[in-house]
Amino acid sequence: MKELQCLVGEQLSAVCFVQDYLQLEFDGYKLTTYTTPLVETLPNEWMAYEHEQYKNGLCRFIARLVEQVVSEPGRILLAFRDCSERISLPIHEGKDNVYYTDLEGGWFVV
């Protein structure tokens, strides 16, 4: 996903919880996800939406700079500067999982 590399160096500026989706905003760039992002708290330990601290865990990334975007089979990982936690965006084949919107309003489906 080379298109998502533009997020590197951008800060997560907002997390928006909407009825059936979630938005991650990066100073103009936006990821709208219809799959629930996971918060990696330790290697191989994750918080999902049902966890009582999930929303706080996700919001802790606000104001942190994206250090790395990695596309792996079945997910996209967002790593942040000065932070051991990561966000994982699950990707399910054959579904519209994540919509990416750029600064000019252009968009594509991940």
Image: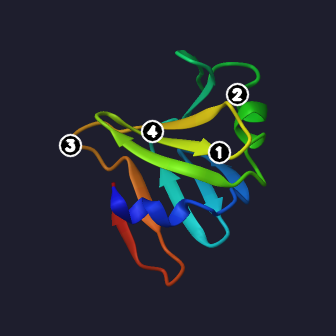
Q: Residue at the location (27% across, 44% down)?
A: 95
Residue 17 image offset from top left, x and y in percent:
66, 47
The disc at residue 94 is 3
Residue 26 vertical placement versus 92 (above, below): below
Proximity of marks 4 and 2: CB atoms separated by less than 8 Å: no
Q: CA distance from mark 4 to mark 1?
A: 20 Å
Tell which circle, 4 or 3, labels the residue nearer the N-terminal end.
Answer: 4
> Crowding near pointer 4: few (<14 within 10 Å), some, many (20+)?
some
Image color mode: rainbow
Q: Residue at the location (69% across, 59% down)?
A: 11
Q: Residue at the location (45% across, 61% down)?
A: 5
Residue 30 vertical placement versus 70 (above, below): below
SS of the residue at dot 2? helix
Looking at the rendering, which quadrant does residue 28 occupy?
Answer: bottom right
Q: Between tags 4 and 1, which lies in front?
A: 1
Residue type of the residue flagged with mark 1? Phe
> Crowding near pointer 2: few (<14 within 10 Å), some, many (20+)?
some
> Crowding near pointer 3: few (<14 within 10 Å), some, many (20+)?
few
SS of the residue at dot 4? loop
Q: Residue at the location (37% across, 46% down)?
A: 97
Proximity of marks 4 and 1: CB atoms separated by less than 8 Å: no
Residue 49 image offset from top left, x and y in percent:
61, 27
Tell which circle, 3 or 2, labels the residue nearer the N-terminal end.
Answer: 2
SS of the residue at dot 1? strand
Q: CA distance from mark 1 to mark 3?
A: 29 Å
Image side of residue 16 versus residue 108, left or right: right
Residue 31 image offset from top left, x and y in percent:
51, 57
| Residue at the disc numbered 2 | 54
Image side of residue 45 versus residue 62, left or right: left
| Residue at the disc numbered 4 | 35
